[in-house]
Structure formats: structure tokens, C-alpha cells
Amino acid sequence: MDGLAEWQLTDTGGVPVFHSPNNAGTGLLTLSVDDLPRHHADLAARDLSVGDITTGEQARFATITDPEGNTITFAELLTAGT
């Protein structure tokens, strides 16, 4: 499709991104990760401004916002003892 870019992340999942200037800065994406502190440190090591890790009832989260205002949240499900 014209204006579409898509990344295949797993055998069954991908992220499509559409060129839509009227909607720029309103995108939200959540990616599940297996080791949030490691991913957080990796983003920080790349000089990306990622927010603090916060913990909810079932997961912990860290969020980064791109220059256009789109938000990517990294989430790690909590397990017993985490």
C-alpha cells in the first residue's frame, strides 16, 4: 500500500505505520518485553529519553515519546516474586 511501512516483529505479529500528516503525533504503541530494566538501560545508553519505570498491579512500564509526539510504551508482565 502506498504510504505504509510494516515491521514483522514475530511470526504472528507486526507493526504497521501509515503516512498520515493529519494524525501525526497521536500514535500509541505498546510493546511487551521480557526484561524491562534491560530494555530501559539499552534505550538510555542510546541517549533516548525514556521515562522512569513505573509498576502497576499486573505489569511495569516505561514510556518514550518520539519528536512528533507519538508514544511507545514498553511493558513487562509481573510474575510472582517480581
Image (cartoon, rainbow, N blue to C red):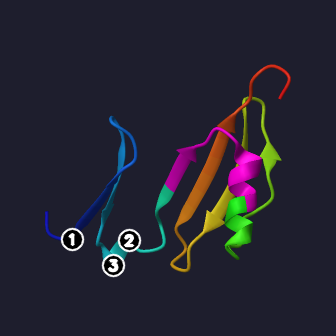
38, 18: nearer the viewer: 38
In the rendered image, the quadrant that contains the N terminus is: bottom left
The reply to whether dot 3 and dot 1 touch (C-beta < 8 Å) is no
Q: Quadrant of residue 77?
A: top right
The residue positioned 86% from the left and 23% from the top of the image is 81
Element under label 1?
loop
Element under label 3?
helix
Question: Which residue has dot 2 on it?
Answer: 23
Of mark 3 and mark 1, the one earlier in the sequence is 1
Q: Is 77 placed above or below 28 here?
A: above
Q: Quadrant of residue 60?
A: top right
Where is residue 22 drawn, in percent x and y? 34, 76
Magenta residues, start to end: 29-41
22, 40: nearer the viewer: 40
The reply to whether dot 2 and dot 1 touch (C-beta < 8 Å) is no
Where is residue 46 drawn, in percent x and y? 67, 73
- Alpha carbon of mark 3 to alpha carbon of mark 1: how far? 11 Å
Question: Which residue has dot 1 on it?
Answer: 3
Q: Label 3 neighbourhood size at 10 Å, few (<14), some (14-19), many (20+)?
A: few
43, 70: nearer the viewer: 43
The reply to whether dot 3 and dot 2 touch (C-beta < 8 Å) is yes
Q: Is residue 30 rendered to the left or right of residue 3?
A: right
3 vs 1, front mark: 1
Q: Tally the marks.
A: 3
In the rendered image, the quadrant that contains the C terminus is: top right
Where is residue 26 drawn, in percent x and y? 47, 66
Amino acid type of the residue tagged 1 in the rendering: Gly
- Alpha carbon of mark 3 to alpha carbon of mark 2: how far? 5 Å
Of mark 2 and mark 1, the one earlier in the sequence is 1
